[in-house]
Image (cartoon, rainbow, N blue to C red):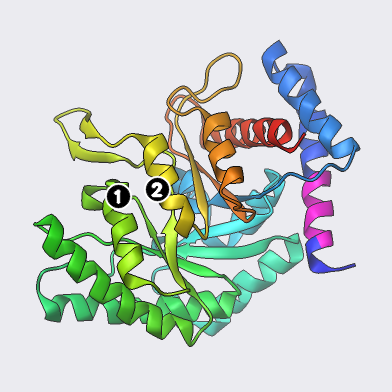
Amino acid sequence: MKRRQFVNTTAKSSLALTFLGAMACKEQSKKETSEVVEEAIKKDEALFFQISLAQWSLHRALKSGEMDNLEFAAKAKSLGCEGLEYVNQFFGDKAKDTAYLNQMNDRAKSEGVENVLIMIDGEGQLADAEAKKRLEAVENHYKWVEAANYLGCHSIRVNIGGGKEMEEAAKAGIDSLQKLSEFAAQENINVIVENHGGFSSNASWVAGIMEKVDMENCGTLPDFGNFCIERGKDSCAEEYDRYKGVKELLPYAKAISAKSHDFNAEGNETHTDFLKMMKMVKDSGYKGFVGIEYEGGNLSEEKGIIATRDLLIKVGKQLSA
């Protein structure tokens, strides 16, 4: 059996077991969602995408010590996810520790899940106005490019923050991404930019940078929710239109982040129309992993992940019909 077939089979089995065990206690709306999912599994109807889990969805458990980074693969598998999106801060001193990386590979392999990408934070500002600081930030990412290659990931996710003036920050970001992508190309790794606050939450700004970088292994990771351009005291003071933003980033997308916070009684996300978003994703021709990134506080981390997964499968089934 090929690895891809094995991953698909084990993920479907996990989903079926999860739903069967939960049927008795779910409310009617949840039952309807589960029935749709079970029917898709029964008919072996593939979605146009695969589901991965962003490790940040479990950041509270990981930061508290309730969960260890090495347990991530098993947890993701138990929640019906086929791919793993790591966050570097949860194994920050292990980038060059091949013995530890071997353990991560072994855990993923034993669970039948795929290492997809590593999200990189805390390694310097790639759009810093000072060339020296910018180069240091670029070089700080090299070890994570090598770690991603060792783990069999296809990408590292980076931030292009640090700029104070939009045009100059764009030039600085282009310079950094070109240097980093040239290094990453030698390791067969993509460098992907997420809309992640500041200027990067302006999707047209990021798209303009992608056009100027113009490298095959440099792309984007459109996030459904990170479009706050300016923060207010307690909330976002100015937000870029999320649907316009995702559409602008999709031509360069090498991964997708399905950000979620809250759900209504029908199981729909209250901030983002997932059907509308995923239709844009499908229409763009994207067929890779879609990562669950639950950041809400009303549900537990696990329940939020499950709610997001159920919604993705429901809309994926609608769009695959």
Residue at point 29%, 63% (across, down): 209
The residue where tag 1 is placed is 204
Q: Are marks 1 and 2 in contact (CB under 8 Å)?
A: yes
Q: Which quadrant holds the C terminus? A: top right
Describe residue 227's horizontal placement relative to residue 280 as left or right: left
Q: State the extent of the magenta-drawn residues as a range.
A: 5-13
**Res. 74 image quadrant:** bottom right
Residue 128 at x, y percent in the picture: 15, 68
The residue where tag 2 is placed is 248
Please say whether residue 166 is one of the residues in the magenta stretch: no
Looking at the rendered structure, the kind of residue marked 1 is: Ser
Residue 158 at x, y percent in the picture: 36, 64
Residue 152 vs 201, above or below: the answer is: below
**Res. 297 image quadrant:** top left
SS for dot 1: helix
Residue at point 79%, 18% (across, down): 24
Residue 305 at x, y percent in the picture: 57, 37
- Give the camera-side residue of 285 and 71: 285
Describe residue 18's horizontal placement relative to residue 122 as left or right: right
Residue at point 65%, 31% (across, down): 315
Gap in angstroms between the C-alphas marked 1 and 2: 6 Å
Residue 311 at x, y percent in the picture: 62, 31
